[in-house]
Image (cartoon, coloured by chain):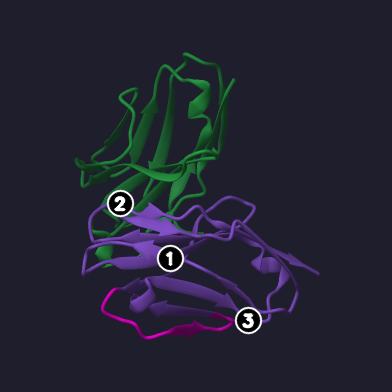
Amino acid sequence: DSGVTQTPKHLITATGQRVTLRCSPRSGDLSVYWYQQSLDQGLQFLIQYYNGEERAKGNILERFSAQQFPDLHSELNLSSLELGDSALYFCASSVVPGLAAGELFFGEGSRLTVL
Amino acid sequence: AQKVTQAQTEISVVEKEDVTLDCVYETRDTTYYLFWYKQPPSGELVFLIRRNSFDEQNEISGRYSWNFQKSTSSFNFTITASQVVDSAVYFCALNRGNYQLIWGAGTKLIIKP
């Protein structure tokens, strides 16, 4: 158990809909990262927050947004969903924002299926 | 450009055999970090090792060992006396100290009893 909690574990929805994925980082971790794992694109970095502020953006679509709340949990919002958004979405956390500081602890992922 | 190549898409061995997973990376940075993660069938990503570019010392952890060679830009992972529980997808990843990991495509390892 990494200590990173993601909900929901599975989600099935229709095209055009909007969903919210939630992540609670490990206790004491201030930095949260979102990754997408899809069959065609593999693992890709989406976005990172540190102590409530956005720190870095990767290949995140404009239809997607995220935020980190004062209690440090984070939410990833996916809107106007398309079939291609079907993927496993991972949240990860670390104590400090730079990955040089140590390992990245991943949650179990939220599997999104868009029909 | 940074890139991680895991040329072996799938490897299948019989239990107790040794197996090596290859990882070749590309970067122009002098400071960078390399990682290995395991993704078992349950789906979570499990951290295995992190190595920085200044530390070429090989590492052994039980049945796992890692060989880091800057001269060939490789960071290979060997499992000795493989077990069925080692069956998983293994990812190699590269980070240059910023906020995002560059991932290889993964190698699916199947250990047959």
- Residue A67 image point, x, y percent: 28, 34
Query: Farthest front residue?
Result: B72
Residue A51 vs B84, above or below: the answer is above
The verdict on residue B59 being magenta is: yes
Query: Chain letter for green?
Result: A
Magenta segment main secondary structure: loop
The verdict on residue B76 being magenta is: no
Question: From mark 3 to mark 2, how far is it between C-alphas?
Answer: 31 Å
Chain label for disc 1: B
Q: Nearer the viewer, mark 2 or mark 1?
A: 1
Question: From mark 1 to mark 3, how far is it between C-alphas?
Answer: 21 Å
Residue picked out by circle 2? B100
Query: Chain letter for purple?
Result: B
Q: Which residues are magenta?
A: B53-64
Residue B53 vs A48, above or below: the answer is below
Question: From mark 2 to mark 1, how far is it between C-alphas?
Answer: 18 Å
- Residue B30 image point, x, y percent: 21, 69
Residue picked out by circle 3? B80
